[in-house]
Image: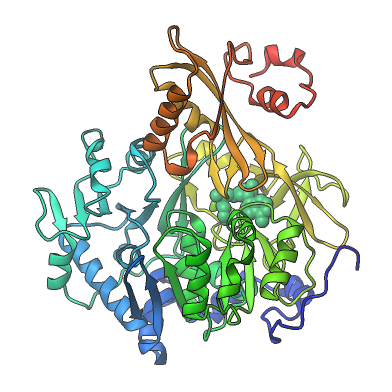
Amino acid sequence: MQGFIEKPATIVPTPNLQDYDETHKTFRWQDAYEKVEWFEDGRLNAACSAVDRHARSWRKDKIALYWQGDDKASKYTFHELSNLSNKFANLLTSSGIEKGDRAFIFLPRIPELYVSFLGILKTGAIAGTMFSAFGTEGLYDRLHDSGARYLITNSELKSRVYEIKDDLPDLEQIIIVDETDVRGGEISYPVEMEKASGTFDVAKMLPDDPAFMLYTSGTTGKPKGVVHRHLAIVGQHATTEWVLDLHEDDIYWCTADPGWVTGISYGLLGPWSCGASVVVHGGRFGPEAWYSMIDQYKVMVWYSAPTAFRMLMRASDAHKKYDLGSLRHICSVGEPLNAEIVHWGIRTFGLPIHDNFWQTETGGILIANYLSMPIKPGWMGKPIPGITAAIIDEDGDTVPHGTEGDLAITPAFPSMMLEIWKNPVKYAEYFRAGWYLTGDKAVQHEDGYFLFIGRADDVINTSGERVGPFEVESALIEHPAIVEAGVIGKPDQLRGEIIKAFVVLAPGYAPTDDLKDDIRKFVKTRLAGHAYPREFEVVETLPKTRSGKIVRRMLRAKELGLPIGDVSTLMGDE
Ligand code: PRX
């Protein structure tokens, strides 16, 4: 078969999804609902499907979470996690939380993050997560738009929230996870958890009731709140089995932070629903730290991202000091996975890396290279059972194999977003002729595999993080030295793309290195650590439409030395 590689003999047999073609043809989500015994009178709660179910079974004393911090570690059985999240749900209820309230978590990857997330779901409130590197503007955008009533944070991060608290009228309760002596208006997690009961009458939710939300970037405007339902866990469970090939005896490590969708769908809900033990690394990335996690915890299934693999690849021999023989399956998501990394996986771990594709909005994996099937390096794979993926044109018609077009999906599957928070117009923009549009350009080969080409819009993907140019531009122009800014993604060997900003300076400012440093810091503290421009170029003017919109494609074309294209249409361009 053209373009495929033989998998090494090191792969253990009996992977899930043995007969892809047959399953893809016959599988119906309805069958999955009937198979899982998670519904009671048509209701469920994703936290119970993930954790409480096991706490009531023989898996009660099995380790659900191995947590490794920089200098300490702890572990929790399914029973303990269930008990702690019940306590947290009681804490929330006694402080007045109601079904549908938004409770946001702003914490590093510590056990309290996982306990809070489950506890919020158990009350019927909506859990929101925010990456701990967010600055004041990133926080404000999320807390304000969602109207969050509750915030769970720690003594270190809370000062960022207090900087904007006066502008957040809905934010009533702030829970601090590491302080016993809290100030007025705050709730102490340690004090209240100590008192709270470990039994809780978990809210029984309708499948379409919202469970969690995450903000994600598009081309225009501020980040949008993508809301996911309790039913999503049925999809996350199925895809965790099919794609990550998790079996209940597996020790599994997803490197993503729960501030992003991967860290929720496959960092906790999916793997726990399969009864697997989850490993969490609380510290920062580093080849030694990462390899020692695999060695120490005997990780079997590992889910990470291309930029991390590329960084490990650069650290050449670092893996040799560790015993990585426990690994049996490796998956990647978030950015294009170059064929080179797949081959590096084989050389380094005796295992190829399996690419898969999905998005915040889809709540779960859509397209994948499966363990049970031949791998096609450089290609994203085939659609999961229960969905149809296609390449469509502007009218919504499918195009012939080999032709580039818009990657689209049939939208009826359980982990598909429920809505865009308070923004039905934006939600409607995702659909064309009954298809859900991913916003990505791709090609399908006649063998059924999909190849990623690039974004159809200006969204930037840097180290697997999705960044909207508008957010960065808005943060930049708040700096006193900047009058106008245009931001693009510039191809980068390590990070996929880096953020490059073209800025027009205010009179009296010179483009010195000090000024550039100052601007970088400014954006970092406002937006988030990953969203600052690594490159700046000072320009006299920015290309614009007649209505004053910055034409980023011209900036990109200039940067890459590509033809600028037809500019005559620009003048009337909206
Ligand atoms: O452009 C695609 C890229 O990441 C986008 C989704 O980003 P986000 O919502 O942050 O979710 C990331 C993790 C699920 C997609 O629209 N992307 C994701 N996976 C791949 C990818 N690009 C190429 N290959 C992939 N496997």
Q: In the rendered view, does 366 fall on the left or right side of 441? A: left
Instruction: Say if 557 sits above or below 190 in the image.
Output: above
Q: Nearer the viewer, residue 328 or 194?
A: 328
Residue 231 visible in the current orientation:
no
Residue farthest along the right direction in this orientation = 1
- The x and y percentages for residue 278 are 45, 75
Q: In the rendered view, does 457 fall on the left or right side of 361? A: right
Q: Nearer the viewer, residue 102 or 535?
A: 535
Residue farthest along the bottom direction in this orientation = 58
Instruction: Say if 256 sits above or below 348 in the image.
Output: above
- The x and y percentages for residue 521 are 40, 33
Q: Residue at x 61, y 70 (%)?
A: 29
- The x and y percentages for residue 531 are 48, 39
Q: Nearer the viewer, residue 538 or 261?
A: 538
Instruction: Say if 38 sits above or below 118 in the image.
Output: below
Q: Nearer the viewer, residue 523 or 250?
A: 523
The quarter of the rendered structure image containing the N terminus is: bottom right
Residue 380 visible in the current orientation:
yes
Q: Residue at x 48, y 32 (%)?
A: 471
What's the colour scheme?
rainbow
- The x and y percentages for residue 151 are 26, 51
How many discs appear?
Answer: 0
Q: In the rendered view, does 517 fall on the left or right side of 120? A: right
Q: Residue at x 75, y 65 (%)?
A: 343
The quarter of the rendered structure image containing the C terminus is: top right
Which of the 4 image quadrants contains residue 220? top right
